[in-house]
Amino acid sequence: MAIFVDQNTKVIVQGLTGGQGKYHGLRNKAYGTQVVAGVTPGKGGTDVEGIPVYNSVAEAVSATGATASFVTVPPKAASAAILEAAAAGITFIVCITEGIPAQDEARTYNTLVRDYPKVRLLGPNCPGIISPGKCNIGITAGEIAELPSATGPNVGIVSRSGTLTYQALYELKQRGIGVSTCVGIGGDPVPGTSFIDCLREFQADPETHAIIMIGEIGGSAEEEAAEFIKANVTKPMSAYIAGVTAPAGKKMGHAGAIVSGGKGTAQGKMDALRAAGVKVGQNPTEAGSLMAEIVAGLK
Amino acid sequence: MDLFEYQGKQYFARFDIPVSRGNVAVTVDEAVAAADAAGYPVVVKAQVQVGGRGKAGGIKLANDAAEVRTHAGNILGMDIKGHLVKRVWVENASDIAEEYYASFTLDRGAKKHLLMLSKEGGVEIEEVAAKNPAAILMLHIDPVDGLSAAAAAKAAVDAKIPEKAQAGVADILVKLYRCFVEGDCDLAEINPLILKPTGEVHALDAKVSLDANADFRHPEWEEFKATEELDAREKLAREKGLQYIGLDGTVGIIANGAGLAMSTLDVVNQVGGTAANFLDIGGGANADLMAGALEVINSDKNVKSIFINIFGGITRGEEVAKGIVEALGRVDLRAPIVIRLDGTNAEEGREILKNAGIPESKLTSKPTMLEAAQAAVALAK
């Protein structure tokens, strides 16, 4: 078991003929992911190292039966690409595109919620998802993910920051701890998938025995996750929040400050998670050590 | 990108939101000319991106050219909470009957647009929120539906805006919402939104923050960029396409990804050091970007050591290594580098660095983030 994607997931790459799409699409395929097609308007009928390219997602889906898409198109075209995938019957969309305007994200997200309620969007501006040994969609270097062990215990990872997602994978690899699934939800204003979405899946996944959560300053997603953990998550957790010493970023102004209601500092997030029973590390390595202790206790 | 008041008002005017007649001035003579054109009495307002201008003496009423001369002379060059006043906005003074508050922003938690509307404007909205939260109407708007004229009219009623001002407020809400969405704002705020004795509703102040990601579809933003206040290091970083924030410490930081960069600052701090900057070279960093990043760090005289912390996803290790080698050939780095390189093609990257013949006094490689931080902090002491 894993969450969201596994060895049976058939994936198309929107933007496979572009630089990033080709590089990461081929790496995902080399990892063992079922990358069955690419989509680039105007390049249908060609192929990228044997992967057939179609003009539209609808054509690619009807030819291959794919259910997942990896969106690697530039910011201007990303929202349309996501909605095209949803309309064509794709149910899991991973969008790594960085730099999509917040207004576009808000509109796209709410369009999905309304018109395509069964579609899950991961990202934008996220590293993607990896169920080690089964499926890797996105830009994670697959070799840094430890395979889950058949007997457990295995750990699920959910992170808001791209590079800290890899850091978390790496910390577990160093300690030989298996990973069920690692999800990078991305740090944009309107992420398609939230901490809570992932925590709910990990809690229900029999192959996941413990969870690491990596957050960062700003917004209130970590505080909301803490509330959810308190009420719904029985599996042991460790966490790390980046940005204890970060400079005050761009101020959102008065309205923004009120929306977060004083939430958003690293300390506030750490306190909220601790109050929910999560072991919180001061840096990624410490979060890894805390997880090693948790895992040792589960054996 | 945060706009000055005068830029916010110019932006509002594009969306037909009524603002006072006025102009911006950088000299006393220009201020007088602006006042003459606006019509007396005028208000001379310091243009700084910080609250409390009025209390600091940065907003003055002037009845004639002589008074404009006095006030503009005092305000230009004034220091308001560390912000130097380089410009004043001179506008026709408005008679005020009542003051309200209106803003649109994105509520990240709800993933919807949020209207905040209050009949208690003219004071800090945080104060209203603390003392009398019931006085603020908070209305979520589905970005797919947008804000209809009917919904805006209902909001004005629900916020208990007096009847005589409801139609005017609702009209401005619809226009401000258009400005927020089509204008790609992170925040569009009017405080105070005033009712004149003559019955018109009018934006007396403007607070606008623009979403930098939408830059590609707003060529008109170019003029706003010209006035952004950045220090020399930040300016250089901007030219090179780097996310950089200057700090006061001695360890220069280069990392890929905002999260890892923040985490790097944390770890440097935890082992007893201080960071000279926050620098995210982003995903897909190549040799050029890395060389540029090192140039920016090298321009900071406080830097005693440089900590490069890279975990490759999109960023490829060999590109990072090539960048460092190229930068060392291009610029004479004053401070030694400590690097921690992991992830995509990290092996190839380490190999390139090893074979480049760089002396250990200039570059050391450490296997973990913590060890690299310790080494960098030790070198900075």
Image (cartoon, coloured by chain):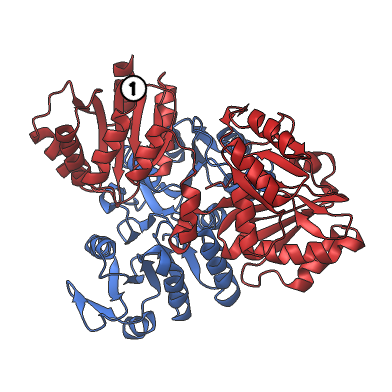
* Any part of residue B109 in sight: no
Q: Residue at 49% x, 29% y: name it.
A: A245
**Residue B157, image x and y in percent?**
86, 63
Which residue is under mark 1?
Answer: B301
Q: Is residue A90 left or right of residue B124?
A: left
Say which element carries label 1: loop
Give the number of marks. Answer: 1
**Amino acid beneath label 1:** Lys
The residue closer to the viewer here, A8 or A136, is A136
**Residue B289, image x and y in percent?**
27, 44
Output the chain of dot 1.
B
The residue closer to the viewer here, B300 or B19, is B19
Q: Residue furthest right?
A: B163
Q: Hue of chain A?
A: blue
Q: Residue at 56% x, 30% y: name it.
A: B84
Q: Quadrant of residue B336?
A: top left
Q: Is residue A283 left or right of residue B358?
A: right
The residue closer to the viewer here, B296 or B88, is B88
**Residue A7, image x and y in percent?**
33, 66
Indicate the chain coloured red by its letter.
B
Q: Residue at 42% x, 43% y: name it.
A: B258
Q: Note whether B246 is above or below A11 in the view shown.
A: above
Q: Quadrant of the C terminus of chain B?
A: top left
Q: Quadrant of residue B154?
A: bottom right
